[in-house]
Each structure stands twice: as C-alpha cells, then as structure tokens.
Amino acid sequence: MERTGLNWLTQAAPDPEDFRAQWERTGLGLTLLPAGRRWDVLAVPGRLGRPALDVLDTAPCGPVLTDSGEDHVSFLVPVGTAARWIGTGVRCAGEGTWIVVPHPGRGSRGVRWLVPPDGSGRLNDPVLLELALHEAAAGLGGW
C-alpha cells in the first residue's frame, strides 16, 4: 500500500518520475506538492477535524493529514472544491498553491498522515465532509 500511495502522490508533481526519484534518493520525509492538480485541500481546526474524521470513519475515507500538534486536520478533496467551499475557519488550498506532504512510508516531523493515500485515487467526498463537520460542530456544543 505504501508504494501505491507514493505512486499516487507523485502524479501531482509537474514531472512525476523525476520528482519520485528525487524524493526516494534524498530520503526526505516531507516535500511540497501542488494542490489543484490531482486534489484540493481543506484544512480545519483540529478540535473540529478529529471528530469529523471519526464521523467519516464509518465510510471509505480519502487521505487526511495533520500537523504535529494536531492544530489542523487537512482533508484531500476533489479538484475545484477549494474554489467553491464556504466555511468559517477553513483554509482552502487549490490551484496555484502548494502543500507540505509527508512520505507515506516514512516518519516525519511536523506533518503526518492520519489516513494515508492507498493509491486508489479515493478522495474525501465534500458533501460527506460537510455533513461530518456539521455533526462534529454540533457535538462540540455549537463550536
């Protein structure tokens, strides 16, 4: 699964083969990849994102990242979602932005996968994510 997740991630790079070779050669745990090519990213505060992930965990879930302090939880969603998303406290990364991504098979400092990519291309469904965020916010007493 690690190898297929790595292959899937590298497809977002401008030159996937060169990017993958460099990532493997350097052994770096983190790298920058462009959002808006294969996925967009919605980053929500951790106190909301973790409960939303628990809600989503009942259905197949796409890749999800968090930072070291779990201050933010970032959901990979279909391209175009960031341009349409409306939500207080949600940071959106789409076309023209870059995100820090950890290697799916290596530990890293700062950013880690809560749900690593499995290579299938599955992303988080924005409709289900919105419902999960609402449910999580309701559970937090109006957040």
Image (tube, helix red, strand yellow):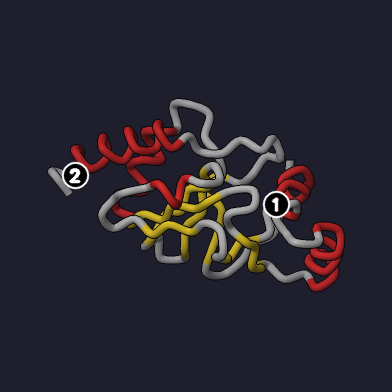
- Percent position of residue 106, x then y: 69, 60
Q: Which mark is residue 9?
A: 1
Residue lying at 50% horizontally and 38% vertically, measured from the top left: 124
Q: Mark 2, mark 1: which one is toward the viewer?
A: 1
> Looking at numbered disc 2 in the image, what kind of residue is underneath it?
Leu
- Alpha carbon distance from label 2 to label 1: 33 Å
Please give the residue where the numbered disc 2 appears in the rendered image. 140
> Looking at numbered disc 1 in the image, what kind of residue is underneath it?
Leu
Displayed quadrant of residue 91: bottom left
Residue lying at 71% horizontally and 40% vertically, measured from the top left: 119
Mark 1 nearby-residue class (10 Å; few <14, some 14–19, many ≥20):
many
Q: Which mark is residue 117?
A: none
- Percent position of residue 62, x then y: 55, 39
Displayed quadrant of residue 92: bottom left
Q: Is residue 123 left or right of residue 51?
A: right
Quarter of the figure that contains the N terminus: top right
- Percent position of residue 68, x then y: 46, 65
Kindly state the secondary structure of the residue where label 2 is placed. loop
- Can you say whether 86 is above or below 135 in the image? below
Q: Is residue 52 left or right of residue 18?
A: left
In the current view of this chain or complex, which residue is farthest to the top? Answer: 59
